[in-house]
Amino acid sequence: MKTNETVFDQQTKRFQKGPNRERIEQLARETMAFLEKRMRDGGLRSVIDDVVDLVGIIGDGVTGRFPVPWTEILKIAGALGYLLCPVDLTPDAIPFIGLLDDVAVIAYAARCLAETISAYRAWRGGGC
């Protein structure tokens, strides 16, 4: 079992090397593919549903009604924080293009947290 210090040291070394351009490009491709599939399957409504569920996971997770690790709550908070932040990669005032980065961040979060979102939807659908 790795200690926190070992994991921290590994992360620090990885961070010091700088961004891995190939990995960033791969994540961008995967996120865009996921987003395209979501938009094709459910349209903008599916992305809105993801945002609503992410907010619900935080609320029910923090209160203890839905069991979710704090690390996932922090990931969700980061994605939603980016969505709400007025300063981001592309200004939201630019029609359509201004929202692409926000939608991409939500799509990435939904892809990373797909199991948690599915479990939450099943839990919520069960009348909890």
Image (spheres, rainbow, N blue to C red):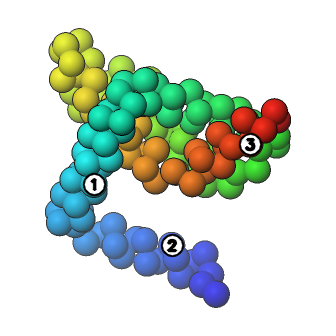
Judge left or right: residue 96 versus residue 75: left
- CA gap, disc 1 and disc 2: 27 Å
Q: Nearer the viewer, residue 18 or 25?
A: 25
Disc 2 marks a residue whose amino acid type is Phe
* Image location (x, y in percent) of residue 124: 73, 36
Q: Earlier in the sequence, mark 1 or mark 2?
A: 2
Is 49 located above or below residue 107 in the figure?
above
Tell me whether circle 1 and circle 2 mark residues in contact (CB < 8 Å): no
Structural crowding at the residue carrying mark 2, measured as other residues with C-alpha within 10 Å and reported as few (<14), some (14–19) or many (≥20): few
Snapshot quadrant of residue 44: top left
Is 7 located above or below residue 97 in the figure?
below
Q: Earlier in the sequence, mark 3 or mark 1?
A: 1
Q: Is any part of residue 104 visible from this angle?
A: no
Disc 3 marks a residue whose amino acid type is Trp
Residue positioned 53% across, 82% down in the render: 6
* Image location (x, y in percent) of residue 126: 78, 38
Q: Nearer the viewer, mark 3 or mark 1?
A: 3
Q: Mark 1 sits on what residue?
A: 30
Snapshot quadrant of residue 18: bottom left
* Image location (x, y in percent) of residue 62: 75, 39
Secondary structure category for the residue under label 1: helix
- CA gap, disc 3 and disc 1: 28 Å
Secondary structure category for the residue under label 3: helix
Q: Mark 3 sits on what residue?
A: 123
Residue positioned 65% across, 40% down in the render: 121
Q: Nearer the viewer, mark 3 or mark 2?
A: 3
Q: Nearer the viewer, mark 1 or mark 2?
A: 1
Report the disc number at residue 13: none
Q: Mark 2 sits on what residue?
A: 8
